C-alpha cells in the first residue's frame, strides 16, 4: 500500500514538473507582436487590411488591434500590411522582435498606410463647414472635421479649397503654418469665399462681466434651410420655463456671420435660482414667413458655464452654427486673459 502511495506521489510531482516546463516554454519560447491604428478617418480601417509576419496572418484581438505570437527563433522577419483584395503589400518593414513588440499605424485620407511615431506627426483640430461637394486640401492631404494628423515636415504650405469635380482650387490661403494643438475654424460664405475664425472678436468690445457672453451665429445653407437671409429672434427662459423673455433680433445672410447678441447666464439667478437657457425663432427675412418656431423646442440651447460657478459664462465670445439645435463652433474663454 505504501509503495502504491509513493508511486502516485511520484507521478503527481512529475506532472507538476512537466506543466512547469510547458509554462516556461510558452513564456520564454514566443514573442508577442501587436499592431494597432492610432488614427484614420475610417472607423473600420483595421478590417480593410491583413497583417502578416513572415507570411503568417496576425490574429484579430480587437477592432483596431492585431496580435501575433512568434517563435523566438524566428524573431527576425518581414511585417507586411496588405489591403484586402490586393496582392502587393501597401506597407513592408524588416523587424527584429523583442519580447513584446508594439507598432502603431496611421492611415491619412488619400494616402498609404504608414508607421506612426510621436516625433513624425502633429495633431491639429479642424472645424470646417463647407457647402456640399467642397473639400479642403493642405499640402495634398484632405482635412476632415475633428482631429487631423499632419506630417511634421508638411506643417507649412497652402490651404486650398476645391469645388465638386474641380481640379483647380476656388480659394487658397497661402503660407499657412500649423501648430500642435491648434484649432482651425473655416466657414464657407460663398462658392469662392471662406471665413477664418481665430477666436475672439478683435473689433467687438468684450462683455462687462463674466455672467455675460457675446454670441454670434453662422448661417450655412442646408436642404431644409436655404433662403437668402433669415431673421433670428432670440429669447431667454428659466430652467422651469416660468418666464420666456425676448432678448433681441438679428438678420443673417446665407453663408455669413451674424452680429453679436449679449446673453446673460445669470438672468434668472435671483428670481428662480437657475441659469438661463436660450432659444430662437427663425423667419425668412425677405418675406416674413416663419421657418422655425421657438415653441417647437428644437432651437433650445444653453451657454456653457465655468466649472466652479454655474452663473459665470465660460466664454466671453462664442460662435454657433444655425441648426436644430444650434451647434457650438468655437469660443474665447474668460479665463484665457488671466492665464496669459
Image: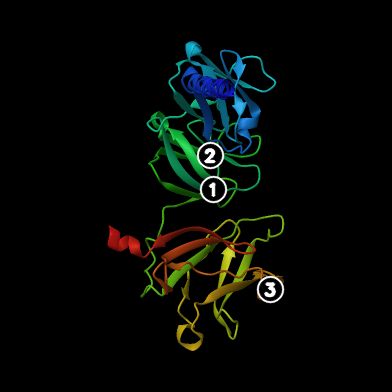
- State the mark number for residue 143: 2
Secondary structure at numbered mark 1: strand
* Residue drawn at point x = 66 percent, y = 72 percent: 297
Residue 221 falls in image quadrant: bottom right
Q: Position of residue 18 (x, y in %)?
A: 53, 19
Secondary structure at numbered mark 2: loop
Report the number of numbered marks: 3
Label 2 Cα neighbours within 10 Å, binned few <14 / some 14-19 / many ≥20: many
Q: Position of residue 2 (x, y in %)?
A: 55, 24
Image marks 1 and 2: residues in contact by CB distance under 8 Å: yes
* Apparent side of residue 228 relative to residue 155 in the rendered image (left or right): right
Image marks 2 and 3: residues in contact by CB distance under 8 Å: no
- State the mark number for residue 293: 3
Secondary structure at numbered mark 3: loop
* Residue drawn at point x = 61 percent, y = 72 percent: 280
- State the mark number for residue 128: 1
Label 3 Cα neighbours within 10 Å, binned few <14 / some 14-19 / many ≥20: some
Amino acid at each position: 500500500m505504501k509503495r502504491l502511495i509513493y508511486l502516485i506521489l511520484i507521478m503527481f510531482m512529475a506532472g507538476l514538473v512537466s506543466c512547469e516546463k510547458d509554462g516556461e516554454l510558452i513564456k520564454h519560447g514566443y514573442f508577442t507582436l501587436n499592431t494597432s491604428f492610432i488614427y484614420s478617418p475610417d472607423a473600420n480601417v483595421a478590417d480593410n487590411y491583413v497583417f502578416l509576419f513572415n507570411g503568417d496572418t496576425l490574429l484579430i484581438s480587437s477592432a483596431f488591434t492585431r496580435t501575433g505570437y512568434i517563435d523566438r527563433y524566428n524573431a527576425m522577419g518581414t511585417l507586411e500590411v496588405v489591403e484586402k483584395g490586393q496582392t502587393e503589400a501597401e506597407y513592408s518593414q524588416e523587424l527584429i522582435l523583442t519580447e513584446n513588440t508594439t507598432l502603431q499605424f496611421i492611415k491619412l485620407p488619400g494616402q498609404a498606410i504608414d508607421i506612426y511615431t510621436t516625433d513624425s506627426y502633429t495633431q491639429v483640430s479642424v472645424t470646417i463647414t463647407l457647402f456640399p461637394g467642397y473639400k479642403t486640401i493642405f499640402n495634398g492631404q484632405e482635412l476632415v472635421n475633428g482631429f487631423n494628423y499632419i506630417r511634421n515636415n508638411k506643417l507649412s504650405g497652402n490651404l486650398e479649397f476645391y469645388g465638386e469635380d474641380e481640379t483647380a482650387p476656388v480659394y487658397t490661403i497661402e503660407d499657412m503654418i500649423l501648430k500642435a494643438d491648434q484649432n482651425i475654424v473655416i466657414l464657407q460664405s460663398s462658392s469662392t469665399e471662406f471665413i477664418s475664425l481665430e477666436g475672439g472678436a478683435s473689433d467687438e468690445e468684450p462683455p462687462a462681466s463674466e455672467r455675460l457672453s457675446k454670441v454670434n451665429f453662422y448661417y450655412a445653407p442646408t436642404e431644409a434651410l436655404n433662403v437668402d437671409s433669415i431673421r433670428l429672434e432670440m429669447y431667454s427662459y428659466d430652467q422651469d420655463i416660468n418666464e420666456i423673455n425676448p432678448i433681441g433680433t438679428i438678420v443673417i445672410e446665407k453663408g455669413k456671420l451674424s452680429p453679436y447678441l449679449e446673453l446673460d447666464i445669470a438672468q434668472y439667478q435671483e428670481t428662480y435660482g437657475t441659469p438661463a437657457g436660450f432659444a430662437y425663432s427663425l423667419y425668412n427675412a425677405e418675406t416674413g414667413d416663419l421657418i422655425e418656431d421657438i415653441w417647437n423646442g428644437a432651437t433650445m440651447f444653453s451657454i456653457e458655464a465655468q466649472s466652479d460657478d454655474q452663473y459665470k459664462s465660460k466664454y466671453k465670445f462664442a460662435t454657433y452654427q444655425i441648426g436644430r439645435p444650434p451647434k457650438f463652433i468655437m469660443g474665447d474663454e474668460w479665463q484665457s486673459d488671466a492665464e496669459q
